[in-house]
Image (cartoon, rainbow, N blue to C red):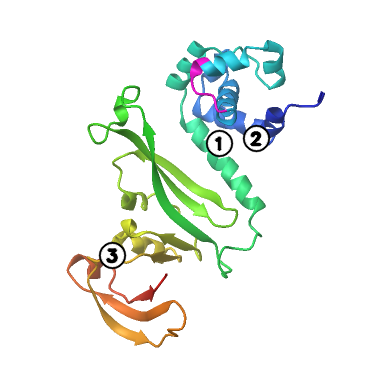
């Protein structure tokens, strides 16, 4: 039998306790009077995630089977359904969001010298979003179609690792392209995204910040070819063009040339 520290305790040691306490004081200033501390709350949520608990009752039953073992896991207060439910409802969620971004920054520094996914010296980020389905009965506030409840997770994924560089959770009806306004831009980096993010006013912000973007074309984008360069058609490349936008709105937001590449993928 292993007499050392439990695996859960070893994982939680990677979370800097002093930094967590500093964030807790900033986001929940009157929280120190509670018996069920923010750290105990975080441990309970992390334990539930790592051990695939399915409900508050499941978390309580698992942790309280052997009370002495829960102490070894790092808990200093007894975890009950009512305590967890009250903490989930009342404690400021921004504490855990701030902690997540702190841990993301620490993890990214570990991979900053890793070779990239492409033959580029600059960082490359993949931009996308996904829905997280919720119970309409339990989360009526997340109703966004009349019959479905969901929130949307927006992610900027650093392809070195790969690790999330920036994440945000929004209501299900929040448009992907609007999230570009919140995306922090790193000069010299490349942002790869799908056609749902085409908005040349917002894409202009990326270029003005000294970064680059690669985005899929959309049939309703109007343009004319200003120049065309020869390509090697024995490769997947089919065309390499410089284009200028047509129409009314788009040229006002992007008056300069754009490079348009066409490839064929079997």
List the residue tagged with mark 2.
15
| Residue 24 spot, x, y in % from top left | 55, 28
List the residue tagged with mark 1.
99
- Mark 2: secondary structure: loop
Q: Residue at x 38, y 80 (%)?
A: 240
List the residue tagged with mark 3.
218
- Mark 1: secondary structure: helix
* Residue 172 vs residue 96, the one in the foreground: 172
- The tag earlier along the polypeptide, 1 or 3, is 1
| Residue 144 spot, x, y in % from top left | 26, 35
Compared to residue 104, the image places residue 61 above or below, namely above
* Residue 193: numbered disc: none
| Relative side of 21 to 264, left or right | right
Question: Which quadrant is the N terminus positioned in?
Answer: top right
- Mark 3: secondary structure: loop
Tell me if mark 2 has few (under 14), some (14-19) or many (20+) residues whose alpha carbon lies within 10 angstroms of its own.
Answer: some
């Amino acid at each position: 039998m292993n007499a050392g520290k439990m695996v859960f305790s070893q994982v939680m040691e990677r979370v800097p306790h002093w930094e967590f306490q500093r964030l807790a004081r900033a986001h929940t200033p009157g929280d120190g009077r509670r018996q069920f501390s923010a750290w105990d709350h975080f441990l309970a949520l992390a334990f539930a995630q790592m051990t695939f608990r399915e409900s508050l009752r499941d978390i309580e039953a698992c942790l309280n089977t052997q009370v002495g073992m829960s102490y070894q896991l790092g808990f200093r207060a007894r975890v009950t359904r009512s305590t967890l439910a009250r903490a989930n409802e009342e404690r400021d969620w921004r504490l855990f969001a701030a902690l997540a971004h702190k841990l993301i920054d620490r993890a990214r520094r570990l991979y900053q010298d890793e070779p990239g996914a492409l033959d580029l010296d600059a960082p490359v980020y993949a931009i996308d979003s996904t829905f997280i389905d919720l119970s309409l009965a339990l989360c009526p506030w997340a109703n966004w179609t009349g019959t479905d409840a969901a929130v949307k997770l927006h992610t900027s994924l650093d392809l070195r690792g790969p690790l999330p560089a920036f994440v945000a959770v929004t209501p299900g009806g929040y448009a992907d392209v609007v999230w570009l306004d919140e995306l922090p831009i790193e000069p010299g980096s490349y942002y790869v995204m799908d056609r749902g993010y085409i908005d040349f006013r917002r894409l202009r912000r990326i270029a003005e910040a000294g970064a680059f973007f690669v985005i899929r074309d959309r049939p309703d984008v109007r343009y004319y070819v200003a120049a065309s360069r020869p390509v090697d058609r024995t490769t997947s490349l089919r065309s390499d063009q410089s284009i200028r936008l047509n129409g009314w709105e788009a040229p006002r937001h992007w008056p300069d040339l754009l490079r348009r590449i066409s490839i064929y993928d079997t």
